[in-house]
Image (cartoon, rainbow, N blue to C red):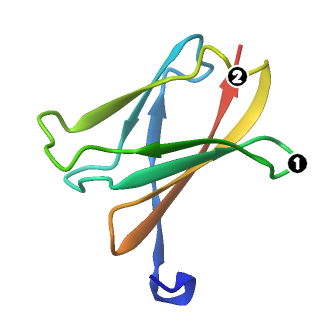
Amino acid sequence: VCSSDLQNQSLFVYPNPVGNRLSVACGEHALKSADIYNAIGKSVMHIQFSDIRTLPVEELDVQNLSTGIYFITAIDGEKLFRSKFIKQ
C-alpha cells in the first residue's frame, strides 16, 4: 500500500497515560497492524492483529516500554490511523 493512498484518521487510545495495557480502537475499522514509535521516531514495537476480530478494541501489552511519549500508527488496509500516548 502506497502511503500517498492512505488517509490519516484518528485512532483512539486509552487509558492515557497508560501503565501496562493500552486499548486501541478506531470505530468499525478492523486493524491489520500497528507500529509504536518513541519520541525520536524509532520503531519500538510492531503488532500484527488477527484476521478474526471479536471485539471493536485491541489491547496491547506495553509494560516493557520505558516511561515517555510514544506515537502509534495503525493500518486497516486502506486507511492510516495515528495517535500518541504517554507511558507511565
- Residue drawn at (51%, 86%) of the image: 2
- Residue drawn at (43%, 41%) of the image: 12
21, 32: nearer the viewer: 32
Q: Decide: few, some or many residues near mark 2? Use Cα within 10 Å; few <14, some 14-19, many ≥20.
A: some
Looking at the image, is 4 positioned above or below residue 75?
A: below
Looking at the image, is 73 positioned above or below residue 44?
A: below
In the image: residue 81, left or right of residue 71: left
From the top left corner, tell me how far across and down residue 51 is, in percent.
19, 50
In the image: residue 30, left or right of residue 84: left
**Mark identifier at residue 65:** 2
From the top left corner, tell me how far across and down residue 47 is, in percent.
47, 42
- Residue drawn at (46%, 77%) of the image: 7
Amino acid bearing label 2? Leu
Q: Decide: few, some or many residues near mark 1? Use Cα within 10 Å; few <14, some 14-19, many ≥20.
A: few
Q: Residue furthest right?
A: 40
Which image quarter: residue 75? bottom left
* Distance (Cα) linking label 2 and label 1: 14 Å
From the top left corner, tell me how far across and down residue 50 is, in percent.
25, 44
Amino acid bearing label 1? Ile
Label 2: which secondary element = loop
Label 1: which secondary element = loop
62, 24: nearer the viewer: 62
From the top left corner, tell me how far across and down residue 31 is, in percent.
32, 53
First in sequence, mark 2 or 1: give its number: 1
- Looking at the rendered image, the quarter that the N terminus falls into is bottom left
- Residue drawn at (16%, 33%) of the image: 55
**Mark identifier at residue 4:** none
In the image: residue 4, left or right of residue 40: left
* Residue position for label 1: 40
- Looking at the rendered image, the quarter that the C terminus falls into is top right
